[in-house]
Image: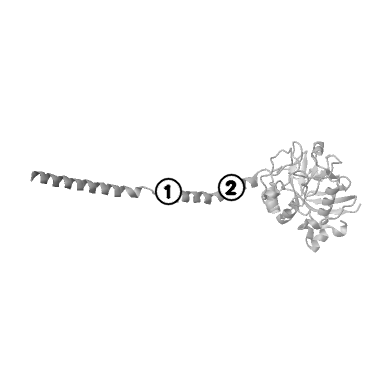
Amino acid sequence: MTARLFRLCALALCLLLVAAACGSSSDTEPDQETPAEEASSQAGEEAAGEDSAPESAAEAGGAEESSPQAEPTGQDESGAAAEEDAGEQRAAQEGPAESSAPSTDATAAESPSDAAEEGPHPALLNPELANETAPATFLVRFTTTKGDFLVEFHRDWAPNGVDRFYNLVRIGYFENIAFFRMVPGFVTQFGLHGDPEVNRVWRAARIPDDPVKESNLPGYVTFATSGPDSRTTQLFINYGNNRSLDSQGFAPIGEVVSGMDVVKSLYAGYGQSPNQSLIHQQGNSYLRSQFPDLDYILSAEIVEQ
């Protein structure tokens, strides 16, 4: 009897221990993550990372936008941020840099005033139409916010450059064009259009280089460049004797023959602050809001000699 009672007690004790063990296991399972749940959690974290990537890209793009504009080799500023379009890399031009090269866009019957009456010239949005050959020599009167100056151009100095400039004047390109880069004693630079759409189409309209036949002396006018065969619409006027630019491929196309005092009086307070990428993208709206004291070319016309 005693042995039987002992066995029953032992059995009851075993049942109690088993029950207790089962209850403990059930309580701890919700706190554990199965492999499937872990995978799901990791996927969620990865998705969150992808969602935040565009913000990083946008920030990076902003940094590029505000970085120094493209410079030719040997210039004082860094090269352009990777162009908005990889195939357009370095298209944002900067003239020769101060240390070595500036920083780095017709007859009276076809003057800008006549073009204004007839509406914009079709070639403003189609550079292929601006393809006339320039005369051997011609004079251009620039009317600016500080007064007039005259430049004489010589086709034998740089045929490709002079033909391009002649056509830009002929189609009325130089209306409300800012002198956006000023380095006293060195250069003043201009040639980016006030209309972003015009900038867009001309940015890719590059012309071949010309051999350098004249020197970058005070008052000489030269196309800016961002590298070989990259000239488009940007030019600079030399303030100083910048012969060092000759060996870098900067070929003068003309010379200021009257009004150099006007050129020297152009507002220089902003120095090289205007951002070329933003001028390309926003045109004169950017310049007038951020740099209201800049001087402008109001018109340019070929005059009878």
Q: Position of residue 243 (x, y in %)?
A: 82, 37
Residue type, label 1: Glu
Pointer 2: residues within 10 angstroms few (<14), some, or many (20+)?
few
Residue visible at 31% across and 47% down in the picture = 28
In the rendered structure, find residue 253 and report the number of the disc placed on it: none
Location of residue 127 by image quarter: bottom right
Q: Earlier in the sequence, mark 2 or mark 1?
A: 1
Circle 1 SS class: helix
In the rendered structure, find residue 38 and report the number of the disc placed on it: 1
Whether 85 is drawn above or below 271: the answer is: below
Q: Is residue 50 left or right of residue 26?
A: right
Residue type, label 2: Glu
Q: Is residue 42 left or right of residue 90?
A: left
Which residue matches tag 2? 59
Residue visible at 84% across and 57% down in the picture = 111
Residue visible at 74% across and 52% down in the picture = 204
| Disc number lying in front (2 or 1) | 1
Location of residue 68 by image quarter: top right
* Direction right: furthest residue: 305
